[in-house]
Amino acid sequence: MKKQRTNLFLGLIFIALGVLALLGSLNIINFKIFFKGWWTLFIIIPCIIDMLEDRIKLSNILFLILGILLFLSSNDLIKFSLIFKFILPLFLIIIGIKFIFNLNYNSNTIIFSNKKIDLELKSNDIKVLFSNIIVNLEKLNKKEIYLDINSYFSEVILYIPKATNVVVEGSSLFSAIIDHRDNKNTDNYKCTLYLKMNSICGDVTLKEVK
């Protein structure tokens, strides 16, 4: 069903562009494929697809807003300087709203803190805001581990058992996954970690349990 929605959306986009390009070629309307701000579609469309295929998340909302603002700026509807003047406060407001409405104190929620967490469940959800945390997966003797991390302006360090295959999905802004493991390319995996990461201004570092 989700794939069908994505195909429908992409199909309508291509049909609309084709019709507009045809009308432009016939001089019925003034339209060019490479219109002002066309490159912002490479930000806007993937965000919409992510919403259709997965769900509406903080990350795709922020990227969608950024893409729309850049499109408006490219067409001289707003000043480019205003984007960076208001985008950070807007990001902080949206992050705050997300925490207020999705805060679950039964999960690992860390705000303005330094903390070490020892995970023992097969599936875990961690929310981090303005914090530095160390997450230890050593006690998880499972073939499959599911870990969702929503990290904003924070640093997360994951200590992972040896011979663990890491599958990463999600989105990030000014963030990266840094893999410091020694044996990350082995073929003899004993466990698979499914890491779903949504991060803004904060890296996630992978290390091996010694």
Image (cartoon, rainbow, N blue to C red):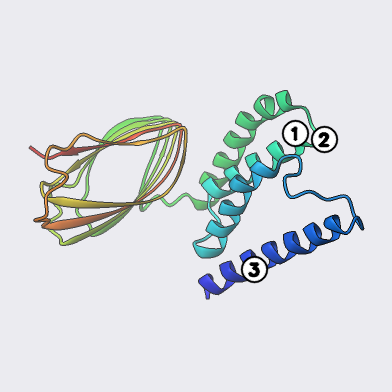
Question: What separation in Å lies between label 1 and label 2 (alpha carbons)?
Answer: 6 Å
Which residue type does callout 3 highlight? Gly
Q: x, y (%) of residue 32?
A: 79, 48
Measured Cα–Cα span from mark 1 to mark 3: 27 Å
Q: Which residue is mark 2?
A: 77
Question: In the rendered view of the protein, which quadrant contains the C terminus?
Answer: top left
Residue 62 image point, x, y percent: 59, 43
Of the numbered discs 1 and 3, the one sitting upstream in the chain is 3
Q: Residues within 10 Å of mark 1 (few under 14, many from 20)?
A: some
Depth order, front residue of 208/185: 185
Residue shown at 10%/46% (left/top)?
Answer: 162
Sequence-earlier tag: 2 or 3: 3
- Please name the residue shown 51% across and 45% down the image: 99
Q: Which residue is mark 3?
A: 11
Number of the front mark, 1 or 3: 3
Closest to the observer, 84 or 29: 29
From the image, tell me which residue sits under label 1.
73
Q: Looking at the image, is 56 positioned above or below residue 207?
A: below
Q: Secondary structure at mark 3?
A: helix
Q: Which residue lies at the image location 85% right of the left edge and 60% below the top edge?
A: 23
